[in-house]
Image (cartoon, grey):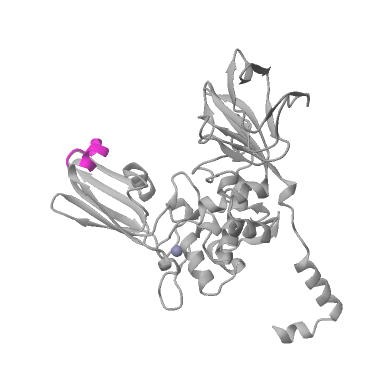
Amino acid sequence: MRIALRTLSVGVLLIFVGFADAPRRRDSDWLIRVGLEQAAWAQVLYVSVSEGVLRWINPRTGQTLGEGTAGQIWELRRENGRLYAQNGQTQIASERLMAEAAEGFVMVGTAPNDLRRYRGHLEWTERDGKLLTINWILLDDYLKATLPREMPPKFHPEALKVQAVAARSFAFRRLNRYRQWGYDLCDHAPCQVYGGVDAEHPNTNAAVDATAGEGLMFEGRVVDAVYTGNCGGHTAPIEVAMVGTRPLRFLSGVSDMNGDGKPFCSVAPNGGWELNLTHAELEKRFPQVGRIRELRLTQRTAGKHAQQVQIRGERATLTLSGAEFRSAVGTGRVRSLMFEVQAQRDGWKLVGRGAGHGAGMCQWGAQGRALAGQNYRQILGAYYPGATLEAL
Ligand SMILES: [Zn+2]
Protein backbone atom coordinates (compact mmCIF):
# COMPACT_ATOMS: atom_id res chain seq x y z
CA MET A 1 0.00 0.00 0.00
CA ARG A 2 2.73 2.43 1.01
CA ILE A 3 4.77 1.58 -2.11
CA ALA A 4 1.79 2.19 -4.35
CA LEU A 5 1.13 5.58 -2.77
CA ARG A 6 4.73 6.65 -3.32
CA THR A 7 4.33 6.25 -7.06
CA LEU A 8 1.57 8.90 -7.01
CA SER A 9 2.49 12.50 -7.52
CA VAL A 10 2.58 14.62 -4.38
CA GLY A 11 -0.21 16.76 -5.80
CA VAL A 12 -2.62 13.86 -6.17
CA LEU A 13 -1.82 12.64 -2.69
CA LEU A 14 -2.49 16.05 -1.18
CA ILE A 15 -5.83 16.34 -2.93
CA PHE A 16 -6.83 12.92 -1.70
CA VAL A 17 -5.83 13.69 1.89
CA GLY A 18 -7.61 17.03 1.69
CA PHE A 19 -10.86 15.39 0.61
CA ALA A 20 -10.71 12.73 3.30
CA ASP A 21 -10.26 15.37 5.99
CA ALA A 22 -12.89 17.78 4.68
CA PRO A 23 -15.41 18.63 7.42
CA ARG A 24 -18.84 17.17 6.73
CA ARG A 25 -20.83 18.62 9.57
CA ARG A 26 -24.20 18.73 7.98
CA ASP A 27 -26.59 17.22 10.50
CA SER A 28 -27.74 20.72 11.42
CA ASP A 29 -29.01 21.18 7.85
CA TRP A 30 -31.83 18.76 8.62
CA LEU A 31 -34.89 19.50 10.67
CA ILE A 32 -37.06 16.49 11.46
CA ARG A 33 -40.43 15.99 13.11
CA VAL A 34 -40.85 13.43 15.87
CA GLY A 35 -44.38 12.39 16.88
CA LEU A 36 -44.35 11.93 20.65
CA GLU A 37 -46.79 9.01 20.51
CA GLN A 38 -45.50 7.54 23.72
CA ALA A 39 -44.56 10.62 25.76
CA ALA A 40 -47.27 13.17 24.86
CA TRP A 41 -50.41 11.89 23.13
CA ALA A 42 -53.59 12.36 25.21
CA GLN A 43 -56.87 14.29 25.52
CA VAL A 44 -55.17 16.83 27.78
CA LEU A 45 -51.49 17.71 27.77
CA TYR A 46 -49.35 19.87 30.03
CA VAL A 47 -46.75 22.30 28.69
CA SER A 48 -44.06 24.36 30.40
CA VAL A 49 -40.52 25.67 29.96
CA SER A 50 -37.38 24.67 31.88
CA GLU A 51 -36.16 28.26 32.30
CA GLY A 52 -36.80 31.73 30.89
CA VAL A 53 -39.81 32.46 28.71
CA LEU A 54 -42.27 30.16 26.94
CA ARG A 55 -43.76 31.62 23.78
CA TRP A 56 -47.11 30.60 22.30
CA ILE A 57 -47.07 31.29 18.58
CA ASN A 58 -49.49 30.83 15.71
CA PRO A 59 -47.25 28.90 13.29
CA ARG A 60 -49.28 30.03 10.30
CA THR A 61 -48.87 33.76 10.90
CA GLY A 62 -45.78 33.80 13.15
CA GLN A 63 -47.71 35.95 15.59
CA THR A 64 -46.92 35.60 19.32
CA LEU A 65 -50.21 34.87 21.09
CA GLY A 66 -48.93 34.81 24.65
CA GLU A 67 -46.03 34.16 26.95
CA GLY A 68 -45.38 32.13 30.07
CA THR A 69 -42.49 31.69 32.46
CA ALA A 70 -40.68 28.76 34.05
CA GLY A 71 -42.74 27.17 36.82
CA GLN A 72 -46.06 27.88 35.06
CA ILE A 73 -47.77 24.79 33.72
CA TRP A 74 -50.22 25.23 30.87
CA GLU A 75 -53.08 22.85 30.28
CA LEU A 76 -53.64 22.19 26.60
CA ARG A 77 -56.85 20.80 25.13
CA ARG A 78 -58.79 20.88 21.89
CA GLU A 79 -62.44 21.80 21.51
CA ASN A 80 -64.47 22.41 18.33
CA GLY A 81 -61.41 22.50 16.14
CA ARG A 82 -59.51 24.99 18.30
CA LEU A 83 -56.58 24.53 20.65
CA TYR A 84 -56.82 26.08 24.11
CA ALA A 85 -53.80 26.63 26.34
CA GLN A 86 -54.75 27.65 29.86
CA ASN A 87 -52.75 28.85 32.83
CA GLY A 88 -54.82 30.20 35.73
CA GLN A 89 -56.96 33.04 34.34
CA THR A 90 -54.96 33.29 31.11
CA GLN A 91 -56.26 31.45 28.08
CA ILE A 92 -54.86 31.31 24.57
CA ALA A 93 -56.96 29.95 21.72
CA SER A 94 -55.96 29.29 18.14
CA GLU A 95 -56.55 26.81 15.33
CA ARG A 96 -52.86 26.03 15.47
CA LEU A 97 -50.36 26.48 18.27
CA MET A 98 -46.63 26.25 18.55
CA ALA A 99 -44.63 26.44 21.79
CA GLU A 100 -41.00 27.48 21.87
CA ALA A 101 -38.52 28.35 24.58
CA ALA A 102 -36.62 31.64 24.31
CA GLU A 103 -33.90 29.99 26.41
CA GLY A 104 -33.94 26.58 28.10
CA PHE A 105 -36.20 23.84 26.78
CA VAL A 106 -39.89 23.35 26.11
CA MET A 107 -41.50 20.70 28.31
CA VAL A 108 -44.52 18.50 27.68
CA GLY A 109 -46.22 15.46 29.20
CA THR A 110 -49.52 13.77 29.99
CA ALA A 111 -49.40 14.69 33.71
CA PRO A 112 -48.42 18.08 35.23
CA ASN A 113 -45.81 16.46 37.49
CA ASP A 114 -44.25 14.36 34.71
CA LEU A 115 -42.98 16.71 32.01
CA ARG A 116 -40.07 15.90 29.74
CA ARG A 117 -37.66 18.47 28.26
CA TYR A 118 -37.16 18.79 24.50
CA ARG A 119 -34.92 20.80 22.20
CA GLY A 120 -36.49 22.52 19.22
CA HIS A 121 -40.16 23.48 19.35
CA LEU A 122 -43.54 21.78 19.75
CA GLU A 123 -46.69 21.73 17.66
CA TRP A 124 -49.88 19.70 17.96
CA THR A 125 -52.11 17.71 15.73
CA GLU A 126 -55.25 15.68 16.37
CA ARG A 127 -55.01 11.94 15.97
CA ASP A 128 -57.76 9.52 17.01
CA GLY A 129 -59.56 12.26 18.94
CA LYS A 130 -56.51 13.07 21.06
CA LEU A 131 -53.77 15.68 20.97
CA LEU A 132 -50.50 14.44 19.61
CA THR A 133 -47.33 16.46 20.17
CA ILE A 134 -44.93 16.93 17.28
CA ASN A 135 -41.38 17.91 18.21
CA TRP A 136 -39.50 19.77 15.46
CA ILE A 137 -35.81 19.18 16.08
CA LEU A 138 -32.45 19.28 14.31
CA LEU A 139 -31.28 15.86 13.17
CA ASP A 140 -28.14 15.92 15.32
CA ASP A 141 -30.17 16.81 18.43
CA TYR A 142 -32.59 14.00 17.61
CA LEU A 143 -29.72 11.51 17.33
CA LYS A 144 -28.18 12.69 20.60
CA ALA A 145 -31.50 12.08 22.38
CA THR A 146 -31.88 8.67 20.73
CA LEU A 147 -28.49 7.01 20.87
CA PRO A 148 -28.29 6.51 24.68
CA ARG A 149 -31.69 4.77 24.60
CA GLU A 150 -30.56 2.43 21.82
CA MET A 151 -27.00 1.59 23.00
CA PRO A 152 -25.42 1.89 26.48
CA PRO A 153 -23.30 5.11 26.51
CA LYS A 154 -20.54 3.18 28.31
CA PHE A 155 -19.89 1.17 25.12
CA HIS A 156 -16.60 1.70 23.25
CA PRO A 157 -16.44 5.02 21.34
CA GLU A 158 -16.11 3.19 17.99
CA ALA A 159 -19.22 1.10 18.74
CA LEU A 160 -21.10 4.31 19.58
CA LYS A 161 -20.03 5.79 16.22
CA VAL A 162 -21.34 2.66 14.48
CA GLN A 163 -24.65 3.21 16.26
CA ALA A 164 -24.69 6.90 15.31
CA VAL A 165 -24.27 6.15 11.59
CA ALA A 166 -26.84 3.33 11.71
CA ALA A 167 -29.38 5.49 13.58
CA ARG A 168 -28.84 8.42 11.19
CA SER A 169 -29.34 6.21 8.11
CA PHE A 170 -32.36 4.53 9.72
CA ALA A 171 -33.89 7.96 10.44
CA PHE A 172 -33.31 9.16 6.86
CA ARG A 173 -35.15 6.15 5.48
CA ARG A 174 -38.14 7.03 7.61
CA LEU A 175 -38.59 10.69 6.67
CA ASN A 176 -42.28 11.32 6.01
CA ARG A 177 -43.28 7.88 7.23
CA TYR A 178 -46.18 9.33 9.27
CA ARG A 179 -47.07 12.05 6.78
CA GLN A 180 -50.83 11.63 7.29
CA TRP A 181 -50.27 13.05 10.80
CA GLY A 182 -47.47 15.40 9.85
CA TYR A 183 -44.31 13.81 11.26
CA ASP A 184 -41.34 11.68 10.25
CA LEU A 185 -40.65 9.34 13.15
CA CYS A 186 -42.35 8.25 16.35
CA ASP A 187 -40.62 8.20 19.76
CA HIS A 188 -40.62 4.48 20.57
CA ALA A 189 -39.48 1.06 19.35
CA PRO A 190 -41.01 0.81 15.83
CA CYS A 191 -38.93 3.91 15.06
CA GLN A 192 -36.14 4.48 17.57
CA VAL A 193 -36.50 5.25 21.26
CA TYR A 194 -36.29 9.05 21.67
CA GLY A 195 -35.85 10.39 25.19
CA GLY A 196 -35.50 14.17 24.77
CA VAL A 197 -32.85 16.26 26.50
CA ASP A 198 -32.76 14.07 29.63
CA ALA A 199 -31.53 11.10 27.59
CA GLU A 200 -28.43 12.90 26.28
CA HIS A 201 -25.01 11.67 27.36
CA PRO A 202 -21.55 13.16 26.58
CA ASN A 203 -20.24 9.86 25.13
CA THR A 204 -23.06 9.45 22.64
CA ASN A 205 -23.04 13.20 21.86
CA ALA A 206 -19.38 12.79 20.88
CA ALA A 207 -20.23 9.85 18.59
CA VAL A 208 -22.92 11.89 16.80
CA ASP A 209 -20.54 14.85 16.35
CA ALA A 210 -17.64 12.66 15.18
CA THR A 211 -19.78 11.11 12.42
CA ALA A 212 -21.81 14.23 11.55
CA GLY A 213 -23.46 13.97 8.14
CA GLU A 214 -22.29 10.41 7.50
CA GLY A 215 -24.71 7.75 6.36
CA LEU A 216 -24.73 4.37 4.65
CA MET A 217 -25.56 4.22 0.96
CA PHE A 218 -26.20 1.38 -1.45
CA GLU A 219 -26.75 1.93 -5.18
CA GLY A 220 -27.47 5.61 -4.69
CA ARG A 221 -29.99 5.22 -1.86
CA VAL A 222 -29.69 5.56 1.89
CA VAL A 223 -29.60 2.14 3.53
CA ASP A 224 -32.33 1.02 5.89
CA ALA A 225 -29.73 0.36 8.57
CA VAL A 226 -31.65 -1.88 10.96
CA TYR A 227 -29.80 -3.25 13.97
CA THR A 228 -30.23 -5.93 16.60
CA GLY A 229 -29.15 -6.38 20.22
CA ASN A 230 -27.13 -9.59 19.90
CA CYS A 231 -27.07 -11.77 16.79
CA GLY A 232 -25.78 -14.92 18.53
CA GLY A 233 -22.89 -15.39 16.09
CA HIS A 234 -24.44 -14.79 12.67
CA THR A 235 -26.78 -12.04 11.51
CA ALA A 236 -30.06 -13.03 9.86
CA PRO A 237 -31.13 -12.22 6.30
CA ILE A 238 -33.71 -9.42 6.56
CA GLU A 239 -36.42 -11.49 4.82
CA VAL A 240 -35.98 -14.19 7.49
CA ALA A 241 -35.78 -11.75 10.41
CA MET A 242 -38.86 -9.64 9.69
CA VAL A 243 -42.27 -10.57 8.34
CA GLY A 244 -43.11 -8.89 5.04
CA THR A 245 -39.60 -7.88 3.96
CA ARG A 246 -37.67 -8.66 0.79
CA PRO A 247 -34.02 -9.68 0.42
CA LEU A 248 -31.43 -6.87 0.37
CA ARG A 249 -27.78 -7.48 -0.39
CA PHE A 250 -26.47 -5.37 2.49
CA LEU A 251 -28.82 -7.21 4.88
CA SER A 252 -28.16 -10.71 3.63
CA GLY A 253 -26.65 -12.06 6.86
CA VAL A 254 -22.98 -12.33 7.82
CA SER A 255 -20.89 -14.39 10.21
CA ASP A 256 -20.06 -12.56 13.44
CA MET A 257 -17.21 -14.85 14.47
CA ASN A 258 -13.71 -13.73 15.39
CA GLY A 259 -10.49 -15.53 14.39
CA ASP A 260 -10.81 -17.90 17.35
CA GLY A 261 -14.25 -19.07 16.26
CA LYS A 262 -16.01 -17.14 19.03
CA PRO A 263 -18.86 -14.70 18.30
CA PHE A 264 -17.84 -11.04 18.66
CA CYS A 265 -21.13 -10.61 20.53
CA SER A 266 -20.10 -13.15 23.18
CA VAL A 267 -19.00 -10.10 25.24
CA ALA A 268 -22.74 -9.73 25.99
CA PRO A 269 -24.06 -10.96 29.33
CA ASN A 270 -26.93 -13.48 29.18
CA GLY A 271 -26.33 -14.46 25.56
CA GLY A 272 -28.30 -17.69 25.95
CA TRP A 273 -31.99 -18.16 26.67
CA GLU A 274 -34.57 -20.91 27.16
CA LEU A 275 -38.33 -20.96 26.86
CA ASN A 276 -40.72 -23.71 27.87
CA LEU A 277 -43.85 -23.99 25.74
CA THR A 278 -46.54 -26.29 27.08
CA HIS A 279 -49.06 -28.17 24.91
CA ALA A 280 -51.80 -26.05 26.44
CA GLU A 281 -50.15 -22.75 25.55
CA LEU A 282 -49.35 -23.68 21.97
CA GLU A 283 -52.84 -25.11 21.42
CA LYS A 284 -54.34 -21.87 22.68
CA ARG A 285 -52.15 -19.81 20.34
CA PHE A 286 -52.70 -22.03 17.32
CA PRO A 287 -56.24 -23.37 17.83
CA GLN A 288 -56.66 -24.23 14.15
CA VAL A 289 -54.31 -27.23 14.40
CA GLY A 290 -56.16 -28.98 17.24
CA ARG A 291 -54.23 -31.14 19.67
CA ILE A 292 -50.54 -30.64 18.85
CA ARG A 293 -48.37 -33.68 18.15
CA GLU A 294 -45.18 -32.07 16.94
CA LEU A 295 -43.34 -28.76 16.83
CA ARG A 296 -40.22 -28.70 14.68
CA LEU A 297 -37.92 -26.55 12.61
CA THR A 298 -38.21 -27.58 8.98
CA GLN A 299 -35.82 -24.99 7.53
CA ARG A 300 -32.82 -23.11 8.85
CA THR A 301 -30.58 -20.47 7.32
CA ALA A 302 -26.85 -21.01 6.86
CA GLY A 303 -26.44 -18.99 10.06
CA LYS A 304 -28.82 -21.36 11.93
CA HIS A 305 -31.82 -19.06 12.18
CA ALA A 306 -35.25 -20.66 12.33
CA GLN A 307 -36.60 -19.97 8.85
CA GLN A 308 -39.59 -22.29 8.81
CA VAL A 309 -41.51 -23.84 11.68
CA GLN A 310 -44.04 -26.65 11.40
CA ILE A 311 -46.76 -27.34 13.93
CA ARG A 312 -48.40 -30.71 13.29
CA GLY A 313 -51.72 -31.21 15.03
CA GLU A 314 -54.65 -33.60 15.03
CA ARG A 315 -56.71 -31.40 12.73
CA ALA A 316 -54.12 -29.66 10.56
CA THR A 317 -50.47 -29.01 9.97
CA LEU A 318 -49.44 -25.37 10.13
CA THR A 319 -46.29 -24.17 8.38
CA LEU A 320 -45.13 -20.67 9.18
CA SER A 321 -41.95 -18.65 8.95
CA GLY A 322 -39.70 -18.39 11.97
CA ALA A 323 -40.45 -14.65 12.21
CA GLU A 324 -44.23 -15.32 12.15
CA PHE A 325 -43.83 -17.95 14.86
CA ARG A 326 -41.70 -15.57 16.97
CA SER A 327 -44.24 -12.80 16.60
CA ALA A 328 -47.18 -15.13 17.43
CA VAL A 329 -45.58 -16.45 20.64
CA GLY A 330 -44.14 -13.03 21.56
CA THR A 331 -40.85 -11.41 20.58
CA GLY A 332 -40.04 -10.85 24.25
CA ARG A 333 -40.31 -14.60 24.96
CA VAL A 334 -38.80 -16.03 21.80
CA ARG A 335 -35.85 -13.70 22.21
CA SER A 336 -34.23 -14.46 18.85
CA LEU A 337 -34.54 -16.72 15.81
CA MET A 338 -31.38 -18.60 16.63
CA PHE A 339 -32.94 -21.46 18.58
CA GLU A 340 -33.43 -25.20 18.61
CA VAL A 341 -36.52 -27.13 19.65
CA GLN A 342 -36.34 -29.93 22.21
CA ALA A 343 -39.31 -32.19 22.92
CA GLN A 344 -40.31 -32.42 26.59
CA ARG A 345 -42.87 -34.51 28.44
CA ASP A 346 -45.42 -31.70 28.67
CA GLY A 347 -44.44 -29.67 25.62
CA TRP A 348 -41.31 -28.23 24.05
CA LYS A 349 -38.29 -26.29 25.14
CA LEU A 350 -36.68 -23.66 22.91
CA VAL A 351 -32.98 -23.24 23.55
CA GLY A 352 -31.57 -20.12 21.91
CA ARG A 353 -28.80 -17.59 21.64
CA GLY A 354 -28.86 -13.86 20.98
CA ALA A 355 -31.54 -11.18 21.31
CA GLY A 356 -33.61 -9.28 18.79
CA HIS A 357 -34.69 -9.87 15.19
CA GLY A 358 -31.08 -10.65 14.23
CA ALA A 359 -30.73 -8.51 11.08
CA GLY A 360 -28.21 -5.76 10.34
CA MET A 361 -25.66 -4.43 12.80
CA CYS A 362 -25.20 -6.55 15.92
CA GLN A 363 -24.87 -4.05 18.79
CA TRP A 364 -22.99 -6.34 21.18
CA GLY A 365 -20.93 -7.57 18.23
CA ALA A 366 -20.02 -3.95 17.42
CA GLN A 367 -18.86 -3.61 21.02
CA GLY A 368 -16.84 -6.86 20.76
CA ARG A 369 -15.26 -5.75 17.48
CA ALA A 370 -14.41 -2.30 18.87
CA LEU A 371 -12.77 -3.91 21.91
CA ALA A 372 -10.80 -6.10 19.48
CA GLY A 373 -9.45 -2.97 17.75
CA GLN A 374 -11.77 -2.49 14.74
CA ASN A 375 -12.81 1.06 13.89
CA TYR A 376 -16.37 2.11 13.09
CA ARG A 377 -15.83 2.02 9.31
CA GLN A 378 -14.59 -1.57 9.49
CA ILE A 379 -17.47 -2.57 11.74
CA LEU A 380 -20.09 -0.97 9.49
CA GLY A 381 -18.46 -2.68 6.49
CA ALA A 382 -18.73 -6.06 8.24
CA TYR A 383 -22.44 -5.77 9.11
CA TYR A 384 -23.74 -4.00 5.99
CA PRO A 385 -21.78 -5.71 3.17
CA GLY A 386 -21.67 -3.68 -0.04
CA ALA A 387 -22.88 -0.44 1.60
CA THR A 388 -20.59 2.59 1.55
CA LEU A 389 -20.14 5.36 4.10
CA GLU A 390 -20.91 8.69 2.48
CA ALA A 391 -21.90 12.27 3.23
CA LEU A 392 -25.71 12.45 3.14
ZN1 LIG B 1 -23.35 -10.71 16.83
Magenta run includes residue 283: yes
Extreme residue in the bottom direction = 3
Q: Is residue 198 above or below residue 252?
A: above
Q: Residue furthest right?
A: 11
Q: Where does the magenta region start and end?
A: 281-291
Q: Nearer the viewer, residue 326 or 112?
A: 112
The N terminus, quarter of image: bottom right
Q: Residue 134: image x %, image y %?
A: 62, 33
Kindly tell me whether residue 326 is visible in this rendering: yes
Q: Is residue 226 visible?
A: no
Residue 330 lies in the magenta stretch: no
Magenta highlight: main SS: helix
Q: Residue furthest top?
A: 80
Q: Is residue 191 left or right of residue 377?
A: left
The x, y position of residue 112, in whole percent, is 53, 29
Ligand 1's image quarter is: bottom left
Give the side of residue 280 with respect to residue 374, left or right. left
Total labels: the figure holds 0
Of 368 and 156, the residue lying toward us: 156
Which residue sits at x=84%, y=81%?
A: 9
Query: What residue is rendered at 37% in x and 47% in y?
Result: 331
Q: Quadrant of residue 232?
A: bottom left
**Quarter assignment of residue 107:** top right
Residue 187 % position (x, y): 54, 40
Q: Is residue 65 above or below residue 283?
A: above
**x, y percent for residue 29:** 75, 47
Residue located at (63% from left, 56% from top) = 205
**Residue at image x 38%, y 63%?**
269
